[in-house]
Amino acid sequence: MLIAMQHDAPQEPLEDAPMLPDGPLRTALEFAVQQLDAAEQEREPAAMSEALAGIARCYRALAAYPTAMDFMHQALRWSYALGGVDQRIELLCELAELSCEAGDAASGEDGERQRLLARDCARDMAFEGARVAAHAADPHWEIKVLLRASDVLDRCGDHDDAITMQTRAMTLMVRHPDVADSIADGQGTATGRMM
């Protein structure tokens, strides 16, 4: 069994960490853990952030959302030491989307409270991602982030805020028609859903 480890100290296996049979998910998780082991030797922020995010993505694929969110939060903390915003923005978007999935999957007697907490986290991460993206030099990147944030807010039931994000993205598209054309090819469904 693989043991999920925090970057600061070894931890016991997490309660929701599933036992993995041999297969692609086990291989991916083993690789991600090896990446984290290597990154821990140097403690270089970009490598630590990416390794922790890799483990989070594996647990997300397994629907082990609390474990995935824990690792994604750790990855986000490491991204603040990088100086740039690109990796931080990507992790904020991923954490927002992951939180939506966790909220949708919450069940049991504590399910409603977990759902509310997950959606609050999703909203916070979506707004933060959009705020930080405003500092990006690339309008293409900012538009994509705004559309991702809009999608998360819509999934959380915040339709007015989602439309505000879409409007901001469309304003940027009008200012940068070359960017709008490339995004329309890959993101057309995201903007069409709420209009």
Image (cartoon, rainbow, N blue to C red):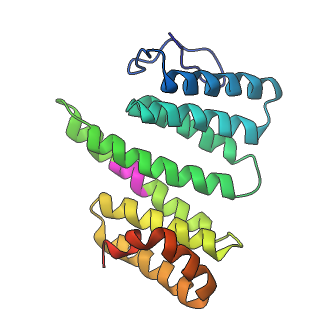
Magenta-colored segment: predominant secondary structure: helix
Residue 16 placement (x, y as % from top left)? 38, 21
Classify 188 as above or below 106: below
Q: Residue at image x 40%, y 19%? A: 18
Number of numbered discs visible in the structure rendering: 0
| 161 left or right, relative to 83 | left
Q: Nearer the viewer, residue 152 or 115?
A: 152
Classify 164 as above or below 15: below
| 135 left or right, relative to 145 | right
Tell me the quarter of the image containing the C terminus: bottom left
Highlighted magenta segment, given as a residue range = 119-123
Location of residue 183 (image quadrant):
bottom right
Q: Residue at image x 64%, y 76%? A: 139
Q: Residue at image x 57%, y 28%? A: 28
Asked if the stretch drawn in magenta spans residue 98, the answer is no
Residue 129 placement (x, y as % from top left)? 54, 60
Residue 192 placement (x, y as % from top left)? 35, 75
Residue farthest toward the left in the current orientation of the protein: 109
Residue 40 placement (x, y as % from top left)? 75, 25
| 159 left or right, relative to 97 | left
Q: Residue at image x 30%, y 57%? A: 156
